[in-house]
């Protein structure tokens, strides 16, 4: 009897959590992490101001698309599309931060390219 009761409670807990998990898959957190990586790249001199501007514009476009998708509810295809776009933007940030273009920083010996 206890095993049946435990199974019923576990199934109802999973059923109650499923809509919450489907609605909030963490894209906002991912956008915040990407924005922080861009800011950190600017602070450390790994990103030039034009690279940072372009990456921020890309991030804003993806966030606007996410808002449009969420207006009528997020479908599976839309969630996968957003994940793909965030992944591509994250890869762009990584590439731009490690492409050996540095902005001039106070205290730096010279310009590095």
Image (cartoon, rainbow, N blue to C red):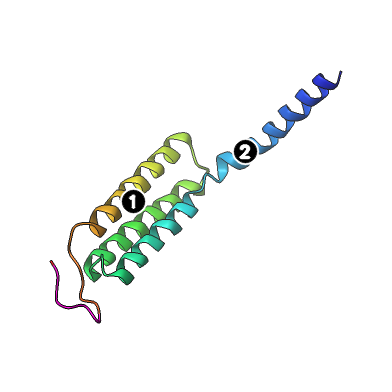
Tell me the distance, in whole angstroms, between the alpha carbons under discs 1 and 2.
Answer: 27 Å
Q: Secondary structure at mark 2?
A: helix
Relative to the observer, which residue lies in front, 54 or 9? 9
For residue 29, side relative to residue 36 (left or right) = right
Q: Farthest residue to the bottom: give it.
A: 106
- Looking at marks 1 and 2 on the same chain, the residue that comes earlier in the sequence is marked by 2
SS class, disc 1: helix
- Residue on which the image places disc 2: 19
Tell me what residue is drawn at x 39 percent, y 51 percent.
Answer: 65
Position in image of residue 86 (x %, y %): 37, 48
- Binning the other alpha carbons within 10 Å of mark 1 as few (below 14), some (14 to 19) or many (20 upward) gives many
Q: Position of residue 80 (x, y in %)?
A: 41, 38
The residue at 45%/59% (across/down) is: 32
The quadrant of the rendering that contains the C terminus is: bottom left
Give coordinates of residue 108: x percent, y percent. Answer: 21, 77
Looking at the image, residue 11 lies above or below residue 112: above
Are dots 1 and 2 in contact, CB under 8 Å? no
Query: Which residue is nearer to you in this view: 94 or 56?
Result: 94
Displayed quadrant of residue 102: bottom left
Decide whether residue 93 is among the magenta residues. no
Q: Give the magenta part as a residue range.
A: 106-112
Residue topped by disc 1? 90
Tell me which secondary structure the magenta stretch mostly adopts: loop
- 23 sits left or right of 62 in the view: right
């Amino acid at each position: 009897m206890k095993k049946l009761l435990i199974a019923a409670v576990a199934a109802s807990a999973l059923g109650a959590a499923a809509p919450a998990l489907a609605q909030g898959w963490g894209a906002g957190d991912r956008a915040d992490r990407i924005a922080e990586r861009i800011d950190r790249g600017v602070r450390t001199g790994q990103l030039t101001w034009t690279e940072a501007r372009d990456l921020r514009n890309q991030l804003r476009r993806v966030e606007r698309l996410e808002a449009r998708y969420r207006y009528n509810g997020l479908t599976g295809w839309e969630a996968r599309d957003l994940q793909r776009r965030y992944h591509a933007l994250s890869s762009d940030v990584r590439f731009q931060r490690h492409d050996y273009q540095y902005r001039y920083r106070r205290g730096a010996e010279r310009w590095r390219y």
